[in-house]
């Protein structure tokens, strides 16, 4: 079985691209590469990661400019064919701006950039990144963002809940959804969501920053390992 | 021809910046201010003498890029003649 092929899209201002590449290489032995924002060829990936950072300096709105990159046309096409896409932090913001995920980001309710570990509860197993995890399982993953206050209008959100599109919620260490556990004021403690088909996932926390023992926490690796398992099932 | 595009968060969408500014104004003693919404203004120089064409183009580009229709509303307006650059 050949190694999973992972493409990390590099935008001007991305700063977690190398972390993501190393994380998938070291956790699932991925054949991982960076593809620049001005390329259209994603090099036949099994997974596309839109990494964290500050693409285009976060000008206008976080993710607003990156959406017009040539590479994003290819990402949209890949996602439309059912390809797995993971947007981390700024990548999540880009997916929302591109309309590949519903909702939009507001400034954190506390107005501050927040950089700390948070607890996430797995809300669904239907995505490739949560397939082998348990619903209700709690992971500790760091966040680092100023615009992570995800929101959507009431009707959109109701539909998303009905269609099982909420993937991660901010919770306490014990798994309780409280206001105190929500670091940015996001609607209903949402930390990550997926599209209707479940192949496109965005989350504000950074699994690539906690995927190896040397980093002091390996909870993030669970998402990548889950993807590797999903890929095997898909290939067989 | 100059067009202004104003972008604000929709009514009902929490505006943490506006709220912080409102709180600061109250601390400074400006009791007449009851609410603040923070937004953005874009000044576009358009290569046309047709105001309808300028406004139509501004509306389209505001909807596509300058505003995010999920959370923001926008308005477009021709700048008064002689507005300084």
Image (cartoon, coloured by chain):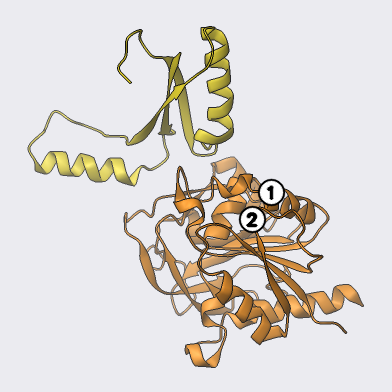
Which residue is drawn at the image coordinates 58% and 46% (left, top)?
A97
Chain letter of the yellow region: B
Toward the viewer: A173 or A117?
A: A117
Residue furthest left as drawn: B29
**Which chain is disc 2 placed on?**
A
Element type at marker 1? helix
Name the image quarter holding residue A34: bottom right
**Which chain is disc 1 placed on?**
A
Which residue is drawn at the image coordinates 35% and 53% (left, top)?
A109
Q: Can the viewer see residue A179 in this picture?
A: yes
Determine whether A149 is above or below B79 in the image.
below
Asked whether, in this view, residue A60 is left or right of residue A39, the answer is: left
Which residue is drawn at the image coordinates 53% and 70% (left, top)?
A16
Q: Quadrant of the N terminus of chain A?
A: bottom right
Q: Can the viewer see residue A180 in this picture?
A: no
Toward the viewer: A29 or A200?
A: A29
Asked if labels 2 and 1 touch by Cβ distance under 8 angstroms, the answer is: yes
Determine whether B82 is above or below A123 in the image.
above
Determine whether A234 is above or below A12 in the image.
below
Residue B3 image point, x, y percent: 44, 18
Residue at numbered disc 1 = A70
Residue at numbered disc 2 = A37
């Amino acid at each position: 079985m050949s190694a999973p092929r992972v493409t990390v899209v590099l935008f001007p201002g991305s700063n977690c691209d190398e972390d993501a590449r190393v994380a998938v290489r070291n956790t699932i032995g991925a054949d991982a590469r960076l593809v620049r924002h001005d390329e259209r060829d994603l090099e036949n990936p099994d997974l596309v990661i839109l990494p964290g950072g500050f693409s285009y300096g976060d000008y206008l709105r976080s993710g607003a400019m990156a959406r017009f990159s040539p590479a994003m046309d290819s990402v949209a096409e890949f996602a439309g064919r059912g390809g797995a896409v993971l947007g981390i932090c700024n990548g999540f913001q880009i997916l929302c701006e591109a309309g590949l995920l519903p909702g939009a980001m507001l400034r954190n309710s506390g107005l501050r950039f927040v950089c700390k570990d948070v607890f996430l509860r797995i809300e669904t197993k239907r995505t490739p990144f949560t397939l082998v995890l348990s619903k209700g399982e709690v992971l500790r993953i760091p966040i680092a963002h100023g615009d992570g206050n995800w929101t959507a209008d009431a009707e959109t959100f109701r539909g998303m809940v009905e269609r099982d599109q909420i993937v991660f919620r901010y919770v306490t260490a014990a798994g309780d959804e409280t206001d105190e556990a929500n670091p940015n004021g996001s609607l209903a403690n949402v930390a990550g969501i997926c599209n209707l088909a479940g192949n496109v996932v965005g989350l504000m926390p950074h699994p690539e920053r906690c995927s190896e023992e040397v980093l002091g926490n390996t909870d993030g690796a669970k998402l990548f390992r889950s993807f590797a398992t999903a890929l095997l099932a898909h290939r067989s | 021809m100059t067009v202004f595009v104003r972008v604000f968060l929709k009514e009902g969408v929490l505006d943490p910046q506006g709220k912080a500014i409102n709180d600061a104004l109250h601390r400074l003693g400006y009791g007449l201010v009851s609410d603040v919404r923070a937004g953005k203004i874009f000044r576009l120089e358009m290569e046309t003498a047709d105001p309808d064409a300028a406004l139509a183009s501004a509306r389209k580009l505001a909807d596509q890029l300058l505003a995010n229709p999920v959370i923001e509303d926008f308005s477009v307006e021709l700048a008064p003649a002689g507005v300084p650059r």
